[in-house]
Structures are given as C-alpha cells and as structure tokens.
Amino acid sequence: MQDERPVPYDISKYPLPAVTVDVVIFSLINRALHVLLVQRKRWPFEGRWAIPGGFIRLDESLEEAARRELEEETGVRDVYLEQLYTFGDVQRDPRHRVISVAYIALVRADAQTIRVSDENSDVRWFPVDQLPSPLAFDHDQILAYALSRLRSKLEYTTLAFQLLPELFSILELKHIYEQILGEKLDKGNFYRKIKEAGILEETPYMREGRGRPTRLWRFRRNRPGDKQFVFRWREDRRES
Amino acid sequence: MQDERPVPYDISKYPLPAVTVDVVIFSLINRALHVLLVQRKRWPFEGRWAIPGGFIRLDESLEEAARRELEEETGVRDVYLEQLYTFGDVQRDPRHRVISVAYIALVRADAQTIRVSDENSDVRWFPVDQLPSPLAFDHDQILAYALSRLRSKLEYTTLAFQLLPELFSILELKHIYEQILGEKLDKGNFYRKIKEAGILEETPYMREGRGRPTRLWRFRRNRPGDKQFVFRWREDRRES
DNA sequence: TTAATTAGTGTATAAATAACACTAAAACCG
DNA sequence: CGGTTTTAGTGTTATTTATACACTAATTAA
C-alpha cells in the first residue's frame, strides 16, 4: 500500500476497521422529494431510523456494494448512483471502528418495483422536510450533506431527469427543480432556458388535465459522437 | 452498523478490507503547480512513483490520518485539507483488498518546513504537467481526479490563497489561477473581479522589480460574525 | 358563454462577461 | 538624460445572460 513502512503480505494482522456502504435513496413521490429510511431493530440506536447500508464484501467494489444494497432495499437496478463522501469518525459506531462510504441514489417513483411500504413497515419513505429526528449514528449529518449535494449538482447536471418518467411536461420538470432546490422558479425563464439547452426531445404526445393540455417531452440521451452537454438551471449557489 | 443483518458485537470475525488514506499534496514551486510523490521501494509496483499515504489507525479519524501523513511527508501542519474520493476497486492492490480514502492538500511553497528534496531522493515534487507515468496502483486515476477537483473548486472558493504567501500581488494571484486552470486570464477583468469580491485587504507594502512596483495585498480572512463569502473567478466549467 | 385553470410566449431591464485600448511608474540603455 | 522596455493598473464598450413580469392560448367547470 502506497506506504513507506514495512508491510507484510498478510496485512490482516493489523487491526482493521470495518467498512460499510450507506445509500441515501431519493425519489419523487406524490410530487415531493422523499428519502428511504429503515428502522433499526437492535442496539445501538434501537428504534431509530437509519440510512440503509451494510458491510462491504471483499469480492465487490464500493459501487457494486452500493448497488447491491440499493437492490435489496428497493428492488431496482440501473439507477443513478454517485459516491457522496466517506465518514470515518472514531466514535460514530459504539461497537467497533466503522468507516462508512456514503452514496446517493435517485430512483423513479413510477417503477412498480419500489415496495411502497405501509405505515408500520420498518422500511419507509419520508418527505425530506419531515424527517424523523434524530436518526441513528451520524446519519443526520450524512443526510444533510446528501441533500446539499443533490441541490448543488442539480444546477449543472441533468440529474433531475433521473427522477422523472420517460415522458414528462416541462412544468413537471420545473416542479422537480423547485422541490429539490426548495424555492419557486420563474415559468417563462425556465421554459426558455430548458429549450435553449437542447436536452429535450419533443414527442407527439399530449397530456390532458384541467386546463390547457400539455406537451410531453423526453430527455435526449447523449448518443456516442454527440457533443457532451450539461444543463444548468443557473449559476449561483453551490456546495462549499 | 446501519444494517439489518444480525451483527455480533465482535465485528472483526468478518473478513475486513484494509483502509488507507492517500494525500495528494499540491504546492506552487517556482510559479508552477507541483505535486509530491514518493518512490516505492518494494513489491508491488517497485520503483514506481506513488501518492503518499498509509494505513489508518483505529484511534484516529480519516482527517486525522490524512494530517498525520501530510506532516510525516512535508513537516507542515495547519494546511488546507479536503477529502477527495474513496477508491475501492477489488483489484487495486494485488496483496489484499485495500480501500483508499484520498485527500487533497494545499501547502505554501515558502514554508521552509518543506524538505526540498534532491534529484535522487525517494520523495520528490513533480510539476503537474511533467508527471512520471504510470504511477503505482490506480494513482494515475486518483491524481487526475484531484487535479480536476482542484480546477473546479478554484472557481468558487478561495482555495488559491492557500498556495500564496501572506503578502502577494494581484498579478501573482492571477498567475496561480492561470497555473491551475491551465489557461490565460484577462488582466483587467481579473483586477476588477477580485477587487469587487472584497476579499483582499490592501497593505502599505510594495514590491520592486523590473517594471513598475506592485502593491502587496493580504487575504482577508473571515472573522467570526462576518458574512461568509466566496470568490468565483467565473461561472462556467465544473467537475462532472 | 363566461370564469377558472393550466400551458406557453414575449419583452424590457439589469447585471455579468469578455475583449481590448489606454495610462502609470519604474528600470534599462544608448 | 531622454527614449525604450517592462511590469502594473484603469477605463470603455459590446455582447451575452439573468430576472421580472405581462401577455396570449387551450382546455374544463359552471
């Protein structure tokens, strides 16, 4: 290991920390941003809600571990997944030294694969503005950071599309931005900006509702050879 | 650990990965951005250059481990340090499963504490555009990512000041931006923008040189109670 | 048939960006 | 000692981008 001290081949003679992967799973449910939490059944933090996670296995990469956790909890695969941060304070777990690599996942609410859990389940979706508090371990901190990162990245990536179904209206997209950023956006400016970005593909479909019917669009995926683009809602406000 | 499977108190009965902390140490030497590398003396990757790092101890946090490594290599304390990313591919170390938490550090070149190593030393500063290749392990990847993060953060933080001495001229600051971003900036625009940001404090000192003497400035640190500010060189170009 | 509702467009102003021409103060050089 | 070179620093303007908000459009409800 990139280390100058003598290191025997059998590294495991040294005392080792445990490594877990925690996945902060976001989804848009009933037009509001939700996060999936699980209720702990035993000590420590018995009864408290926690971010789903588990120990890493020696034969899987960090991202593979995160995908495995995600699939165990939600049944979904092929979703957006990104490493958030690694938390390694000495006392974060009272049992043992545990280092936790946190990930963010964005899943579509329309996937039937998500088990919409009932009120009494030990796995539940919480709106991000109505979280139980405190969470187990240092999970308040992890979740706060995940939200901050989500908001920040929304502005310069096409991340928001990960939360939408195949077809959507421009105002639905705007609504996601508002949910995640936590503020109202101007309709006219949003229309103009998203159109100019050229990341939407018009479809012939319309959706009828109360007022004027709305056109449905599809996210234009980058094809090989296409110039890579990013869409930014605006320039300010970033993560520190 | 935030896990639903039965977990005994003695976690260490499970097979555990090793965890190291690697620190990508940047400094500005002779007006060029450099990075500190160490040469490996034994298998694996014997003779190749590597990012300094070492195993984490059970009684120190990740950041404490990074600061310890940093001090061991450079003798400096109290420098800018930031977690970069955690690398955990299964095969990145042929000896054992090793997960590496990478950090970025920025140190001032004028600190005499940095041992300026001679040509034959196994610890050496390399200009970022003249790196040895390939590095040991997956360190090419880690270093590339560190540079990308550094460039990206430069634009919306006061990071560049970490590389400068106490007193500096505005054109020296501009030069750092150019070094890290790898492109030329407009003098007039730079002057105006940095002045408007209000993050510089004028000093009575001047430095004489070849042409017109230049005024020296000092970075205005945030005092408690001050409104936090960030300086952005400009808005575009970010990390994906 | 009119009001309410949701969708979508247009426009005027302000602010940020970028390019570049200009002035200033010293050293260098015949 | 007077012009040239060198580095420092300011000003001016055109263009692009952001913001606020007024307007038109197409449907349902009453």
Image (cartoon, coloured by chain):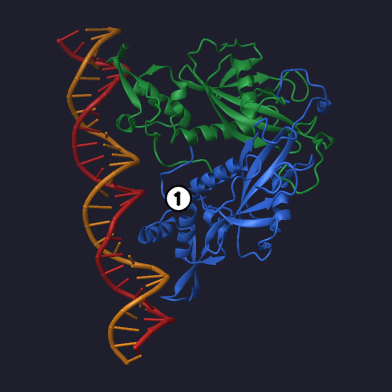
Chain colours: A green, B blue, C red, D orange
Horizontal side of B23 relative to A177 (left or right) equals: right
Q: Chain of mark 1?
A: B
Q: Picture quarter containing residue A20?
A: top right
Percent across and percent down for residue A194 are 34, 30
At 66% across and 43% down in the image, what residue appears? B136
Percent across and percent down for residue A181 are 46, 32
Query: B64 or B42: nearer the eye?
Result: B42
Query: B87 or C21: nearer the eye?
Result: B87
Check disc 1 and give the amino acid type.
Arg
Query: B22 or B165: nearer the eye?
Result: B22
> Would you place residue B180 above or below residue A199 in this image?
below
At 78% across and 26% down in the image, what residue appears? B15
> Would you place residue A90 above or below residue A30 in this image?
below
Give neighbour class at mark 1: few <14, some 14-19, many 20+ (Cα, 10 Å): some
Percent across and percent down for residue A71 are 60, 17
Q: In this view of the protein, can residue B100 be seen by the observer?
A: yes
Label 1 sits on a secondary structure element that is: loop
Q: In this view of the protein, can residue A133 be seen by the observer?
A: no
At 43% across and 28% down in the image, what residue appears? A177
Horizontal side of B209 relative to B72 (left or right) equals: left
Q: Quadrant of the N terminus of chain B?
A: top right
Percent across and percent down for residue A58 are 72, 26
Q: Which residue is mark 1?
A: B232
